[in-house]
Image: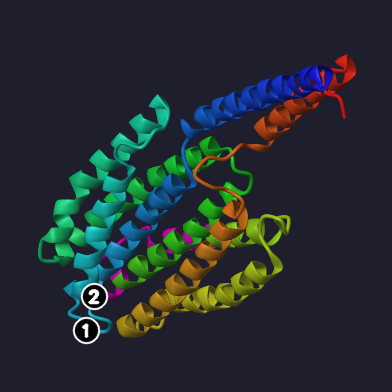
Amino acid sequence: MQHKHIVTKSIYLPVRYILTLLAVTTLFFCTEVSANASAENVHEMANICMQANRLLKDYALVGMKVKYSDPAKDLKENLKIMEQEFKDLEGQKVNDKLAAEIVEIEKSWHAIKPEFEKTPARAEMLNLRKRVEKFTARCEEVAEDISKDTGIKGEHNVVLAAALGMESQRLAALYLMKAWGVTDSDYETEIKQVVEQTEKIYNELLEAKEEFVSKEIKAKLKKVEKDFIAFSVMATSNSGRFMPSQAAKMATKIFKALRSILDMEQKLVEGKVSGYFMPVADEKTAGEIFRVLTGRVYAQGEIKV
């Protein structure tokens, strides 16, 4: 009986030590990774990038006194959404470089925001659009930097999906600016850039591996791409006839479709990610540690089956 008691202890102690060591190792990896940017950080910055051009579109609609879909209400609500997104980003655990970039973007936005709170003026539209253009270009760069820091494979495609939403609203803002009678000598060049950039993004998403952009998402992308092309034809028309309400309707339709695609893309690439996650390299490392540890224990005969 005494011999059996000793055997029991020889089984119990090594297993306990292994489990403790593995728990500590797992905690170490999770703690390290949790210091990285989260998927939610990407969502927040991507939303900020999209909302800026949407606000510009609403600004022009309010200025033209277009009533479709109550742009004045949308303008106020979207300003609140922007503020909430920035608040959500504040205090997040990211590295110093990303923290500085987020502060930079927030300061840039708060320099622009007061213009959106004023009564829309045609004389201010061109300058405001140029400021928003500069802001969104930098915003997209920061969103990409955050996506890389998450360590999540496929997160780049989330940023691309958000960029489509941004470009669709940019196209709408440009068209409505022209419809309002705001002169911009670079209008045709800028419209061409929007169309080319959008086509480039669509192609990259459609050519992506299905583990990152599913067949269902690609089918929806092809459908919304047709709507975007129709919208771009309207924007490049030289007929001199403008349809701001129709443009607002098309822009809203495209934006909602792209929001749905963005949600699907987020779920696809982040579906296996919880509050703490391990990038593939760290997961393999943890697995290797487990294999080596248990292999060594078995080799030394410390665990008896």
User: Magenta stretch?
Assistant: 177-197
Q: Quadrant of residue 57?
A: bottom left
Describe residue 246's horizontal placement relative to residue 114 as left or right.
right
Point 20% across, 45% down: residue: 110
The residue singled out by tag 2 in the image is 71
Q: Nearer the viewer, residue 121 or 296?
A: 296
Relative height, residue 201 to residue 24 (above, below): below
The residue singled out by tag 1 in the image is 67
Q: Nearer the viewer, residue 107 or 95?
A: 95
| Helix, strand or loop status at disc 1 | loop
Magenta residues: mostly which secondary structure?
A: helix
Q: Nearer the viewer, residue 92 or 243?
A: 92
Relative height, residue 103 to residue 226 (above, below): above
Query: In the rendered structure, which amino acid carries the disc numbered 1?
Result: Lys
Residues at marks 2 and 1, CA–CA distance in whole angstroms = 7 Å
Residue 37: image location, x then y, percent: 46, 37
